[in-house]
Image: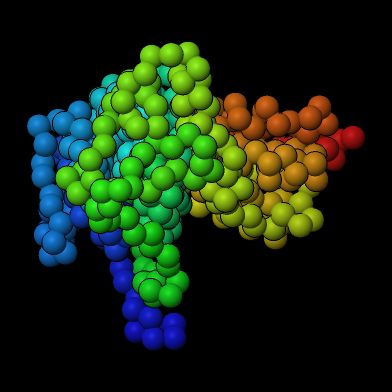
Amino acid sequence: MGKIGKKAVLMQGNEACALGAIRAGCRFFAAYPITPASEIAETMALELPKHGGTFIQMEDEIGSAAATIGASLAGVKSMTATSGPGFSLMQEAIGYAIMTEVPAVFVDVQRLGPSTGLPTKPSQGDIMQARWGTHGDHPIIALYPSTVEEVYRYIITAFNLSELYRTPVIFLMDEILGHMRESFFMPSDKEITILPRMDGEVPVEEIYHPFESDLDIPTPLRAMGKTRFHVSGLIHDESGFPVGTSGIASRLLRRLENKIRLHVDEIVIYDEFMTDDMEILVLAYGSVARSALRAVKIARMDGIKVGLFKPITIWPFPSRRLRKLLRKVDAIIVAEMNLGQISREVTRLIHENVKVEFVNRVDGELIEPDEILDAITRVKNVFNEY
Protein backbone atom coordinates (compact mmCIF):
# COMPACT_ATOMS: atom_id res chain seq x y z
CA MET A 1 0.00 0.00 0.00
CA GLY A 2 1.22 3.52 -0.70
CA LYS A 3 -0.18 6.89 -1.70
CA ILE A 4 -3.00 7.44 0.82
CA GLY A 5 -3.62 3.74 1.24
CA LYS A 6 -3.84 2.97 -2.48
CA LYS A 7 -2.73 -0.39 -3.80
CA ALA A 8 0.43 -0.32 -5.90
CA VAL A 9 0.46 -2.79 -8.78
CA LEU A 10 3.02 -3.92 -11.33
CA MET A 11 1.27 -4.66 -14.58
CA GLN A 12 1.89 -5.30 -18.26
CA GLY A 13 0.13 -3.01 -20.73
CA ASN A 14 -1.92 -5.81 -22.29
CA GLU A 15 -2.87 -7.06 -18.84
CA ALA A 16 -3.92 -3.54 -17.81
CA CYS A 17 -6.13 -3.37 -20.91
CA ALA A 18 -7.92 -6.58 -19.96
CA LEU A 19 -8.31 -5.81 -16.26
CA GLY A 20 -9.41 -2.22 -16.91
CA ALA A 21 -12.03 -3.50 -19.35
CA ILE A 22 -13.37 -5.92 -16.75
CA ARG A 23 -13.58 -3.11 -14.22
CA ALA A 24 -15.46 -1.03 -16.80
CA GLY A 25 -18.09 -3.78 -16.89
CA CYS A 26 -16.95 -5.79 -19.91
CA ARG A 27 -18.50 -9.24 -19.63
CA PHE A 28 -17.89 -10.65 -23.09
CA PHE A 29 -14.63 -11.02 -24.98
CA ALA A 30 -14.12 -12.78 -28.30
CA ALA A 31 -10.78 -12.85 -30.08
CA TYR A 32 -8.30 -14.84 -32.14
CA PRO A 33 -4.68 -15.03 -30.89
CA ILE A 34 -2.29 -12.62 -32.60
CA THR A 35 1.05 -11.07 -31.67
CA PRO A 36 1.45 -8.64 -29.92
CA ALA A 37 -2.10 -8.64 -28.49
CA SER A 38 -2.38 -12.24 -27.29
CA GLU A 39 -1.83 -11.43 -23.61
CA ILE A 40 -5.11 -9.51 -23.59
CA ALA A 41 -6.93 -12.69 -24.59
CA GLU A 42 -4.90 -14.76 -22.13
CA THR A 43 -5.79 -12.43 -19.26
CA MET A 44 -9.44 -12.34 -20.28
CA ALA A 45 -9.59 -16.14 -20.47
CA LEU A 46 -8.28 -16.32 -16.92
CA GLU A 47 -10.09 -13.41 -15.27
CA LEU A 48 -13.37 -12.81 -17.11
CA PRO A 49 -15.13 -16.01 -15.88
CA LYS A 50 -14.38 -14.95 -12.30
CA HIS A 51 -16.66 -11.96 -12.86
CA GLY A 52 -19.48 -13.86 -14.50
CA GLY A 53 -18.28 -13.02 -17.99
CA THR A 54 -17.73 -15.09 -21.11
CA PHE A 55 -14.49 -15.62 -23.03
CA ILE A 56 -14.52 -17.30 -26.42
CA GLN A 57 -11.68 -17.93 -28.85
CA MET A 58 -13.14 -17.54 -32.32
CA GLU A 59 -12.02 -19.09 -35.59
CA ASP A 60 -10.73 -15.76 -36.91
CA GLU A 61 -10.91 -12.00 -36.45
CA ILE A 62 -14.02 -11.62 -38.60
CA GLY A 63 -15.90 -13.99 -36.31
CA SER A 64 -14.45 -12.23 -33.26
CA ALA A 65 -15.77 -8.85 -34.37
CA ALA A 66 -19.19 -10.27 -35.26
CA ALA A 67 -19.48 -12.09 -31.93
CA THR A 68 -18.52 -8.92 -30.05
CA ILE A 69 -21.25 -6.95 -31.80
CA GLY A 70 -23.81 -9.70 -31.22
CA ALA A 71 -23.02 -9.94 -27.51
CA SER A 72 -23.41 -6.19 -27.15
CA LEU A 73 -26.82 -6.31 -28.80
CA ALA A 74 -27.73 -9.11 -26.39
CA GLY A 75 -27.11 -6.76 -23.50
CA VAL A 76 -23.51 -6.97 -22.24
CA LYS A 77 -20.52 -4.71 -22.65
CA SER A 78 -18.18 -6.39 -25.12
CA MET A 79 -14.63 -6.12 -26.42
CA THR A 80 -12.23 -7.75 -28.85
CA ALA A 81 -8.49 -7.29 -29.32
CA THR A 82 -6.17 -7.83 -32.25
CA SER A 83 -3.22 -6.42 -34.19
CA GLY A 84 -2.87 -4.90 -37.66
CA PRO A 85 -3.73 -7.89 -39.90
CA GLY A 86 -6.71 -8.85 -37.74
CA PHE A 87 -7.80 -5.22 -37.49
CA SER A 88 -7.94 -5.12 -41.29
CA LEU A 89 -10.26 -8.14 -41.28
CA MET A 90 -12.55 -6.49 -38.74
CA GLN A 91 -13.27 -3.38 -40.78
CA GLU A 92 -16.54 -4.50 -42.36
CA ALA A 93 -17.91 -5.44 -38.94
CA ILE A 94 -16.79 -2.09 -37.51
CA GLY A 95 -18.74 -0.37 -40.28
CA TYR A 96 -21.78 -2.46 -39.37
CA ALA A 97 -21.43 -1.44 -35.71
CA ILE A 98 -21.21 2.22 -36.72
CA MET A 99 -24.33 1.99 -38.89
CA THR A 100 -26.31 0.02 -36.30
CA GLU A 101 -24.97 2.11 -33.40
CA VAL A 102 -23.76 -0.82 -31.35
CA PRO A 103 -21.39 0.03 -28.48
CA ALA A 104 -18.26 -2.13 -28.43
CA VAL A 105 -14.52 -1.66 -27.93
CA PHE A 106 -11.98 -2.78 -30.55
CA VAL A 107 -8.37 -2.92 -29.33
CA ASP A 108 -5.55 -2.77 -31.88
CA VAL A 109 -2.05 -3.41 -30.53
CA GLN A 110 -0.08 -2.20 -33.53
CA ARG A 111 2.88 -3.96 -35.09
CA LEU A 112 4.98 -3.16 -38.13
CA GLY A 113 3.25 -3.81 -41.44
CA PRO A 114 1.67 -3.97 -43.95
CA SER A 115 0.75 -7.65 -44.25
CA THR A 116 2.50 -9.96 -41.78
CA GLY A 117 5.32 -7.45 -41.43
CA LEU A 118 7.31 -7.77 -38.21
CA PRO A 119 4.88 -9.29 -35.68
CA THR A 120 7.07 -8.60 -32.64
CA LYS A 121 8.06 -5.02 -33.50
CA PRO A 122 6.21 -1.76 -32.75
CA SER A 123 4.62 0.63 -35.19
CA GLN A 124 2.04 3.38 -35.37
CA GLY A 125 0.97 2.48 -38.88
CA ASP A 126 -2.74 1.94 -38.18
CA ILE A 127 -3.62 5.54 -37.34
CA MET A 128 -5.41 6.23 -40.61
CA GLN A 129 -6.90 2.74 -40.72
CA ALA A 130 -8.51 3.49 -37.36
CA ARG A 131 -10.12 6.56 -38.92
CA TRP A 132 -10.97 5.38 -42.42
CA GLY A 133 -10.57 1.60 -42.38
CA THR A 134 -14.18 0.84 -43.16
CA HIS A 135 -16.01 2.19 -46.20
CA GLY A 136 -18.38 5.11 -46.41
CA ASP A 137 -18.69 8.36 -44.47
CA HIS A 138 -18.64 7.59 -40.79
CA PRO A 139 -17.54 9.02 -37.44
CA ILE A 140 -15.10 7.26 -35.14
CA ILE A 141 -13.61 7.66 -31.69
CA ALA A 142 -10.07 6.35 -31.16
CA LEU A 143 -7.97 6.61 -28.00
CA TYR A 144 -4.22 6.01 -27.70
CA PRO A 145 -2.57 6.04 -24.24
CA SER A 146 1.18 6.11 -23.62
CA THR A 147 1.65 4.53 -20.18
CA VAL A 148 0.39 1.34 -18.56
CA GLU A 149 -1.59 3.37 -16.02
CA GLU A 150 -3.21 5.29 -18.88
CA VAL A 151 -4.09 2.00 -20.57
CA TYR A 152 -5.98 0.95 -17.44
CA ARG A 153 -7.74 4.30 -17.02
CA TYR A 154 -8.55 5.03 -20.63
CA ILE A 155 -9.91 1.61 -21.53
CA ILE A 156 -12.59 2.47 -19.00
CA THR A 157 -13.07 5.80 -20.79
CA ALA A 158 -13.35 3.92 -24.09
CA PHE A 159 -16.26 1.87 -22.72
CA ASN A 160 -17.95 5.00 -21.36
CA LEU A 161 -17.70 6.81 -24.69
CA SER A 162 -18.94 3.73 -26.50
CA GLU A 163 -22.01 3.51 -24.28
CA LEU A 164 -22.77 7.24 -24.29
CA TYR A 165 -22.51 7.75 -28.04
CA ARG A 166 -23.55 4.21 -29.02
CA THR A 167 -20.60 3.64 -31.27
CA PRO A 168 -17.65 1.29 -31.58
CA VAL A 169 -14.54 2.84 -30.02
CA ILE A 170 -11.05 2.00 -31.25
CA PHE A 171 -8.42 1.61 -28.54
CA LEU A 172 -4.95 1.89 -30.04
CA MET A 173 -1.76 0.61 -28.45
CA ASP A 174 1.59 -0.50 -29.85
CA GLU A 175 3.86 -3.47 -29.17
CA ILE A 176 6.00 -1.51 -26.72
CA LEU A 177 3.03 -0.31 -24.69
CA GLY A 178 1.37 -3.72 -24.82
CA HIS A 179 4.41 -5.60 -23.54
CA MET A 180 6.06 -3.17 -21.10
CA ARG A 181 5.52 -3.49 -17.38
CA GLU A 182 5.09 -0.48 -15.11
CA SER A 183 3.96 0.15 -11.56
CA PHE A 184 1.11 2.47 -10.70
CA PHE A 185 -1.43 3.07 -7.98
CA MET A 186 -4.75 1.41 -8.71
CA PRO A 187 -7.43 4.13 -9.00
CA SER A 188 -10.14 4.05 -6.36
CA ASP A 189 -13.82 3.80 -7.18
CA LYS A 190 -14.15 7.53 -6.46
CA GLU A 191 -11.57 8.34 -9.14
CA ILE A 192 -13.29 6.59 -12.02
CA THR A 193 -16.70 6.85 -13.62
CA ILE A 194 -18.37 3.82 -15.16
CA LEU A 195 -21.46 4.22 -17.31
CA PRO A 196 -23.72 1.17 -16.96
CA ARG A 197 -25.55 -0.48 -19.83
CA MET A 198 -29.26 0.36 -19.66
CA ASP A 199 -31.28 -2.74 -18.99
CA GLY A 200 -34.89 -3.78 -18.52
CA GLU A 201 -37.95 -4.19 -20.69
CA VAL A 202 -39.83 -1.36 -22.33
CA PRO A 203 -43.48 -1.25 -21.19
CA VAL A 204 -45.94 -2.54 -23.78
CA GLU A 205 -47.54 0.88 -24.12
CA GLU A 206 -44.16 2.50 -24.81
CA ILE A 207 -42.69 2.16 -28.30
CA TYR A 208 -38.92 1.76 -28.27
CA HIS A 209 -37.22 3.43 -31.20
CA PRO A 210 -33.49 2.71 -30.89
CA PHE A 211 -32.54 5.05 -33.75
CA GLU A 212 -34.32 8.29 -32.92
CA SER A 213 -33.30 10.99 -35.39
CA ASP A 214 -33.98 14.16 -33.40
CA LEU A 215 -31.92 13.53 -30.27
CA ASP A 216 -28.58 15.12 -29.39
CA ILE A 217 -27.35 11.94 -27.66
CA PRO A 218 -28.47 8.53 -29.01
CA THR A 219 -31.23 6.62 -27.26
CA PRO A 220 -29.58 4.18 -24.82
CA LEU A 221 -29.34 0.67 -26.23
CA ARG A 222 -31.53 -1.92 -24.54
CA ALA A 223 -30.92 -5.65 -24.66
CA MET A 224 -32.47 -7.74 -27.39
CA GLY A 225 -34.68 -10.43 -25.92
CA LYS A 226 -35.97 -8.06 -23.26
CA THR A 227 -36.99 -5.51 -25.86
CA ARG A 228 -37.97 -6.07 -29.48
CA PHE A 229 -36.33 -3.97 -32.17
CA HIS A 230 -34.90 -4.37 -35.64
CA VAL A 231 -31.22 -3.99 -36.54
CA SER A 232 -29.98 -3.59 -40.09
CA GLY A 233 -26.81 -2.38 -41.78
CA LEU A 234 -29.04 -0.96 -44.52
CA ILE A 235 -30.18 2.65 -44.41
CA HIS A 236 -33.00 2.65 -41.87
CA ASP A 237 -35.46 4.88 -40.07
CA GLU A 238 -35.79 5.40 -36.32
CA SER A 239 -37.41 1.99 -35.89
CA GLY A 240 -34.42 0.22 -37.45
CA PHE A 241 -36.30 -1.08 -40.49
CA PRO A 242 -34.69 -0.49 -43.91
CA VAL A 243 -35.99 2.50 -45.85
CA GLY A 244 -34.20 3.25 -49.11
CA THR A 245 -35.11 6.90 -49.65
CA SER A 246 -32.54 9.65 -50.19
CA GLY A 247 -33.93 11.90 -47.48
CA ILE A 248 -33.69 9.24 -44.78
CA ALA A 249 -30.21 8.21 -45.99
CA SER A 250 -28.91 11.76 -45.70
CA ARG A 251 -30.55 12.32 -42.32
CA LEU A 252 -29.16 9.09 -40.89
CA LEU A 253 -25.57 9.57 -42.07
CA ARG A 254 -25.50 13.20 -40.97
CA ARG A 255 -26.87 12.22 -37.55
CA LEU A 256 -24.18 9.56 -37.15
CA GLU A 257 -21.56 12.17 -37.97
CA ASN A 258 -23.07 14.90 -35.81
CA LYS A 259 -23.39 12.82 -32.65
CA ILE A 260 -19.57 12.80 -32.55
CA ARG A 261 -18.77 16.12 -34.26
CA LEU A 262 -21.06 18.19 -32.04
CA HIS A 263 -19.50 16.69 -28.91
CA VAL A 264 -15.82 16.92 -29.83
CA ASP A 265 -14.99 19.16 -26.88
CA GLU A 266 -16.43 16.58 -24.47
CA ILE A 267 -14.68 13.67 -26.21
CA VAL A 268 -11.12 14.86 -26.85
CA ILE A 269 -8.44 14.16 -24.25
CA TYR A 270 -4.86 15.43 -24.41
CA ASP A 271 -1.91 16.27 -22.19
CA GLU A 272 0.43 19.24 -22.37
CA PHE A 273 3.87 19.71 -20.84
CA MET A 274 5.73 23.02 -20.54
CA THR A 275 3.63 24.83 -23.14
CA ASP A 276 3.21 28.17 -21.33
CA ASP A 277 6.36 29.88 -22.61
CA MET A 278 7.37 27.55 -25.45
CA GLU A 279 8.81 28.66 -28.77
CA ILE A 280 8.97 25.12 -30.21
CA LEU A 281 6.27 22.45 -29.86
CA VAL A 282 6.76 18.69 -30.08
CA LEU A 283 3.75 16.53 -30.91
CA ALA A 284 3.94 12.81 -30.14
CA TYR A 285 1.54 10.09 -29.03
CA GLY A 286 1.60 6.54 -27.72
CA SER A 287 5.01 5.15 -26.82
CA VAL A 288 6.77 7.87 -28.81
CA ALA A 289 5.38 10.47 -26.40
CA ARG A 290 7.59 8.94 -23.70
CA SER A 291 10.71 9.62 -25.73
CA ALA A 292 9.40 13.07 -26.62
CA LEU A 293 8.88 14.03 -22.97
CA ARG A 294 12.44 13.01 -22.15
CA ALA A 295 13.76 15.05 -25.07
CA VAL A 296 11.75 18.09 -24.01
CA LYS A 297 13.10 17.89 -20.46
CA ILE A 298 16.69 17.68 -21.70
CA ALA A 299 16.16 20.58 -24.11
CA ARG A 300 14.72 22.67 -21.28
CA MET A 301 17.87 22.02 -19.22
CA ASP A 302 19.80 23.41 -22.20
CA GLY A 303 17.70 26.56 -22.13
CA ILE A 304 15.53 25.76 -25.17
CA LYS A 305 11.91 26.76 -24.71
CA VAL A 306 10.11 23.69 -25.97
CA GLY A 307 6.84 22.04 -24.98
CA LEU A 308 5.01 18.78 -25.66
CA PHE A 309 1.47 18.19 -26.89
CA LYS A 310 0.30 14.59 -26.44
CA PRO A 311 -3.07 13.74 -28.02
CA ILE A 312 -4.75 10.80 -26.29
CA THR A 313 -7.92 11.07 -28.32
CA ILE A 314 -6.46 10.53 -31.78
CA TRP A 315 -9.88 10.68 -33.44
CA PRO A 316 -11.58 13.10 -33.37
CA PHE A 317 -8.23 14.88 -33.70
CA PRO A 318 -7.87 17.69 -31.12
CA SER A 319 -7.53 20.34 -33.82
CA ARG A 320 -9.00 23.23 -31.85
CA ARG A 321 -6.48 23.06 -29.02
CA LEU A 322 -3.54 22.38 -31.30
CA ARG A 323 -4.44 25.35 -33.50
CA LYS A 324 -4.27 27.62 -30.45
CA LEU A 325 -0.90 26.22 -29.44
CA LEU A 326 0.49 26.72 -32.94
CA ARG A 327 -0.22 30.45 -32.67
CA LYS A 328 2.36 30.62 -29.87
CA VAL A 329 5.31 28.86 -31.53
CA ASP A 330 7.86 29.29 -34.31
CA ALA A 331 8.08 25.57 -35.10
CA ILE A 332 6.47 22.20 -34.48
CA ILE A 333 8.14 18.80 -34.53
CA VAL A 334 5.92 15.76 -35.19
CA ALA A 335 7.40 12.41 -34.12
CA GLU A 336 5.67 9.13 -35.03
CA MET A 337 6.49 5.53 -35.91
CA ASN A 338 5.11 5.75 -39.44
CA LEU A 339 5.79 7.77 -42.56
CA GLY A 340 3.60 10.67 -41.54
CA GLN A 341 -0.02 9.86 -40.72
CA ILE A 342 -0.80 12.35 -37.96
CA SER A 343 1.58 14.76 -39.72
CA ARG A 344 -1.09 15.19 -42.38
CA GLU A 345 -3.56 16.38 -39.77
CA VAL A 346 -1.02 18.77 -38.26
CA THR A 347 -0.04 20.37 -41.58
CA ARG A 348 -3.67 21.32 -42.18
CA LEU A 349 -3.48 23.59 -39.15
CA ILE A 350 -0.12 25.21 -39.93
CA HIS A 351 0.13 28.86 -40.93
CA GLU A 352 2.99 30.10 -43.06
CA ASN A 353 5.15 31.42 -40.22
CA VAL A 354 5.48 28.05 -38.45
CA LYS A 355 8.30 25.72 -39.47
CA VAL A 356 7.46 22.01 -39.51
CA GLU A 357 9.97 19.23 -38.80
CA PHE A 358 9.17 15.52 -39.01
CA VAL A 359 10.79 12.64 -37.14
CA ASN A 360 9.68 9.30 -38.59
CA ARG A 361 10.78 5.72 -38.09
CA VAL A 362 9.49 2.53 -39.75
CA ASP A 363 12.16 -0.02 -38.90
CA GLY A 364 10.39 -1.62 -35.96
CA GLU A 365 12.31 0.39 -33.37
CA LEU A 366 11.09 3.11 -31.03
CA ILE A 367 12.03 6.70 -31.81
CA GLU A 368 14.64 7.54 -29.17
CA PRO A 369 14.85 10.78 -27.17
CA ASP A 370 18.11 11.73 -28.89
CA GLU A 371 16.43 11.69 -32.30
CA ILE A 372 13.77 14.13 -31.14
CA LEU A 373 16.37 16.20 -29.29
CA ASP A 374 18.42 16.45 -32.49
CA ALA A 375 15.35 17.75 -34.31
CA ILE A 376 14.74 20.32 -31.56
CA THR A 377 18.35 21.48 -31.79
CA ARG A 378 18.23 21.71 -35.60
CA VAL A 379 15.10 23.84 -35.47
CA LYS A 380 16.57 26.07 -32.76
CA ASN A 381 19.78 26.58 -34.75
CA VAL A 382 17.80 27.63 -37.82
CA PHE A 383 16.13 30.40 -35.86
CA ASN A 384 19.42 31.45 -34.27
CA GLU A 385 20.82 32.11 -37.75
CA TYR A 386 18.23 34.81 -38.39
Q: Toward the viewer: 15 or 53?
A: 53
- Answer whether residue 217 is visible to the viewer in this image: yes
At 26% from the left and 37% from the top, the residue drawn is 229
Q: From the viewer's perspective, is 279 left or right of 244?
A: right
- Measured as percent of width and height from the top left, residue 236 is found at 37, 24
- Measured as percent of width and height from the top left, residue 210 is found at 36, 39
Quadrant including the C terminus: top right
Q: Toward the viewer: 133 or 147?
A: 133
Which residue is at the far front? 205
- Answer whether residue 176 is visible to the viewer in this image: no
Q: Toward the viewer: 213 or 37?
A: 213
In the displayed structure, 336 sits above or below 197; it is: above
Q: From the viewer's perspective, is 175 left or right of 307?
A: left
- Measured as percent of width and height from the top left, residue 112 is found at 35, 31
Q: From the viewer's perspective, is 178 left or right of 40?
A: right
At 38% from the left and 48% from the top, the residue drawn is 220
Quadrant including the N terminus: bottom left
In the displayed structure, 78 sits above or below 378; it is: below
